């Protein structure tokens, strides 16, 4: 039976139940619960059998594409397979049932986990200290910029501008504005790298920082990073690394050793927490000793009495979130790191790089590749050749859904026209990569033979082409019966 355009409430039938609870041996009128807390009306709950509930949600879960269903090569996002053991550990009652208001003496295991996780991140990034509070990468950028602001103010030299390359992720300029700075954008050179002359020309006593993604959003390592660090530090400015691409570096190279003063990590990317459906993320910021005094409070410390939350931080920028960050995501990252070990993390990054280069070589004959040298964990093709034949990248992306694959990231980075940004990650098999490459090659052939087929895609999904502008402008957040 084909089903499931309805909500679970439409399936409700009076008297049907999906649970068996023990008989209630107290009654509201016994007076045990104060009158004012008693509800007056029955809650509006669907009355359905257990089987109906299971089928309803299983069917819903397969309507959208997700990483447990198929390949999801969304560039920059690191949609890797997330081992289920991470969830299992995060669900242990000792973690899941902790209350954030609990005295820390009764949550020593949790504090120890946070402390050890932070130390592991400092080791991986080559930094001195860390905050686990930010809830996402963008939030980490904002936190770091506030710390940089506090650092410059403390040194009696408040500054105005933060520099970014034209390949930067959109969250970088947004965070700069939110932190009260002006954005100064500089051009990349013909190899897709930061142009050192343009950088020298831009840096002056008003420069607070340079934000750089490394490897950058073209998947290319900024080989001039040490020179870049010198230019920035000679002007007493600070160097920030957008660490969203750390999946290419683990165990191979460390931002701290390259001269970065701060870096954020996206635990929901590199450290294996499910994401993409709006679930919680985590964007810790690791810093060197220049920025350490400005970290958000509390920081976790170890004293004679055990692990403590240290609030005695006079130069701290304060809190950037309620409580201590998204703890369950930290548990997943900690589990992942212990399971992988340093050797495993290194192998993961190496495999991510091999997989991206494998796809690069399989597809470069069919799609333009404007920047092709020293590609690491992701590869950015251009659909310009196909666009000239009348089929845009966004249409190729939709057609991929008919082949059972999520589209790569499209139209980003902005410096590649008709961009197709592919990040396969280390967790995919060669068979999957071959099938994906073949799908793109087949679509390229369809563009010559049957372009309408591609332009009207997707054909096999629960919904067809959507009005994307209306979808983001006229939000429909509530179910209404059609
Ligand atoms: C994902 C990403 C970000 C933002 O991280 P969120 O966790 O989504 O806030 C920033 N920069 C780059 C390069 C990214 O890929």
Image: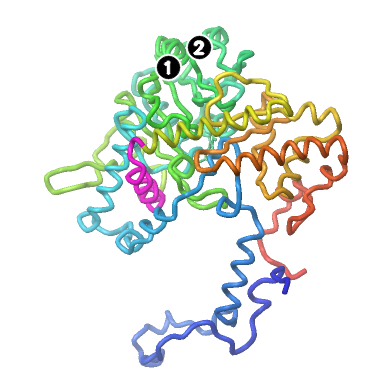
Q: What mark, if any, has residue 422 been given in the picture?
A: none
* Left or right: 355 as drawn, with respect to 29: right
Residue at 41% from the left image edge and 84% from the top image edge: 35
Number of marks in picture: 2
**Residue 316's image quarter?**
top left
Residue 289 is situated, as x and y percent measured from the top left of the image, at 29, 25
| Left/right of residue 296 with respect to residue 445 in the rendered view | left
Q: Residue 191's quadrant in the figure?
A: top right
Along the line of sight, which residue is nearer the eye, 356 or 321?
356
Check the picture and name the quadrant holding the C terminus: bottom right
If the image is split into quadrants, where does the N terminus sit?
bottom right
How many other residues sit within 10 Å of disc 1, few (<14), some (14-19) or many (≥20)?
Answer: many
Camera-nearest residue between 153 and 373: 373
Q: Residue 90, how many percent across, how many down?
A: 37, 56
Residue 263, picture quadrant? top left
Q: Earlier in the sequence, mark 2 or mark 1?
A: 2
In 3D space, how far apart are the residues under numbered discs 2 and 1 (Cα atoms)?
9 Å
Q: Is residue 338 part of the magenta span, yes or no?
A: yes
Q: Which region of the structure is painted magenta?
A: 324-343
**Residue that badge 2 annotates:** 203
Dot 2 falls on a residue whose secondary structure is loop
Up-down: is 478 above or below 465? below
Q: Are circles 2 and 1 on residues that touch, CB within 8 Å?
A: yes
x and y, in percent, of residue 465 in the image: 79, 50
Task: Identify the element where label 1 is drawn.
Answer: loop
The residue drawn where x is 16% and y is 48% is 306
Residue positioned most to the left: 304
Apparent side of residue 227 relative to residue 61 in the rendered image (left or right):
left
Residue hosting label 1:
237
């Amino acid at each position: 039976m084909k089903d499931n355009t309805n909500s679970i409430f439409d399936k409700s039938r009076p008297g049907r139940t999906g649970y068996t609870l023990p008989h209630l041996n107290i009654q509201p009128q016994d007076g045990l619960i104060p009158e004012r807390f008693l509800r007056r009306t029955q809650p509006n709950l669907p009355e359905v059998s257990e089987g109906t509930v299971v089928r309803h949600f299983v069917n819903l879960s397969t309507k959208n594409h997700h990483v447990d269903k198929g390949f999801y090569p969304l560039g920059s996002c690191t949609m890797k397979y997330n081992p289920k053991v991470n969830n299992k550990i995060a669900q242990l009652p000792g973690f899941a049932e902790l209350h954030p208001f609990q005295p820390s003496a009764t949550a020593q295991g949790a504090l120890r986990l946070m402390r050890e996780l932070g130390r592991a991140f400092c080791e991986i990034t080559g930094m001195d200290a860390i905050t686990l509070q930010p809830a996402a990468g963008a939030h980490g950028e904002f936190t770091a910029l506030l710390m940089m602001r506090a650092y410059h103010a403390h040194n009696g030299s408040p500054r105005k501008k933060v520099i970014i390359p034209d390949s930067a992720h959109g969250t970088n300029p947004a965070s700069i504005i939110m932190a009260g700075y002006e954005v100064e954008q500089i051009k990349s050179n013909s190899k897709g790298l930061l142009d050192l002359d343009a950088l020298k020309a831009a840096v002056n006593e008003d420069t607070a920082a340079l934000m750089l993604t490394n490897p950058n959003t073209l998947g290319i390592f900024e080989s001039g990073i040490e020179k870049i660090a010198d230019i920035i530090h000679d002007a007493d400015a600070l160097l920030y690394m957008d660490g969203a691409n750390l999946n290419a570096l683990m165990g191979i190279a460390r931002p701290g050793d390259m001269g970065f003063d701060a870096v954020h990590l996206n635990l929901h990317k590199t450290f294996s927490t499910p994401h993409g459906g709006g679930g919680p993320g985590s964007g810790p910021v690791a810093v060197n000793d220049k920025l350490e005094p400005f970290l958000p409070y509390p920081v976790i410390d170890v004293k004679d009495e055990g692990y403590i939350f240290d609030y005695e931080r006079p130069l701290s920028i304060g809190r950037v979130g309620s409580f201590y960050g998204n703890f369950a995501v930290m548990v997943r990252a900690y589990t992942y790191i212990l399971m992988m070990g340093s050797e495993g993390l290194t192998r993961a990054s190496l495999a991510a790089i091999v997989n991206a280069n494998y796809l690069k070589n399989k597809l470069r004959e069919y799609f333009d590749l404007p920047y092709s040298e020293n590609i690491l964990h992701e590869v950015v093709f251009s659909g310009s050749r196909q666009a000239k034949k009348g089929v845009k990248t966004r249409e190729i992306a939709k057609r991929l859904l008919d082949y059972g694959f999520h589209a790569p990231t499209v139209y980003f980075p902005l410096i590649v026209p008709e961009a197709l940004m592919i990040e396969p990650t280390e967790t995919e098999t060669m068979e999957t990569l071959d099938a994906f490459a073949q799908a793109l090659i087949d679509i390229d052939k369809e563009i010559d033979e049957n372009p309408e087929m591609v332009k009207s895609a997707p054909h096999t999904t629960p919904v067809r082409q959507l009005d994307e502008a209306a979808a983001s402008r006229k939000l429909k957040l509530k179910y209404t019966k059609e």
